[in-house]
Amino acid sequence: MDTQILKIAFLIGLAASTIIRIPYQRETKQNTIIDNRKTPQENGLLFLVFLGMVALPLVYVFTPWLDIANYHLPIWANGLGVVTFAIAMWLFWRSHHDLGRNWSPTLQVREAHTLIVSGIYQKIRHPMYTSIWLWSIAQALLLPNWIAGLSGIIGFGILYIVRVRNEEQMMLDQFGDQYQEYMHKTKRLIPYLL
């Protein structure tokens, strides 16, 4: 598939994620934080994700600076990238929609925070992380470049490994036995598997 088409598909997905998130960012700013576990490490991890999933891909899309690291994929892999990104964006939207005012971009509990166990959260504890894993995979399939294509998997992978246990501990501290029971009924990323 033509790399320009793949780059456009990536940019559409990136724009979609921004459009999805904007109303929830506005709403979140209005909620009072009652437990803030945002650390300098968290800021560094978020920067790493931004670098891997936004900055380096945009450098690849708009400049020839990373072209030395290009690779070739069969057309079916590119098509799989488009489908994977579409599923990722639906799940990204659905996660935000189901969380509503409870969404936070960092490790924070806000006033009137409730435990969401319905919608997509009925089967998956961290569907937003699932959506970002899918986004990272799609990025590698849409941007055939060893740097820009794989930087999302690396950046988000590091954040996920460090953050998920801290996030679950924060939820256990906030919701206690209710969250413990929820953990036993659900999987972290993939229903019935993982």
Image: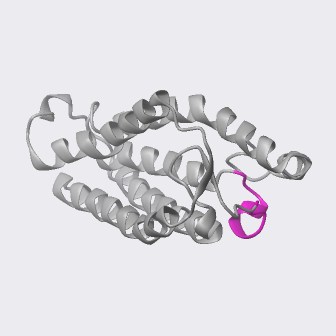
In the picture, which quadrant includes the N terminus? Answer: bottom left
Residue 156, percent from left and from top: 46, 37
Q: Which quadrant of the rendered structure holds the C terminus?
A: top right
Q: Position of residue 143 (x, y in %)?
A: 28, 45
- How far across and down, in percent of the image, does residue 184 sit? 88, 46
Quarter of the rendering containing residue 83: bottom left
> Depth check: 101 or 139 in front?
101
Q: Tell me the chief SS of the magenta region.
A: loop
Q: Position of residue 131 (x, y in %)?
A: 54, 54
Q: Is residue 25 above or below residue 141?
A: below
Residue at coordinates 59% horizontally, 30% vertically from top-left? 161
Identify the residue at horizontal 40%, vertical 62% (top origin): 17
| Depth order, front residue of 41/192 | 41
- Left or right of residue 181, residue 148 in this image: left
Q: How many marks?
A: 0
Which residues fall within the magenta stretch? 115-125
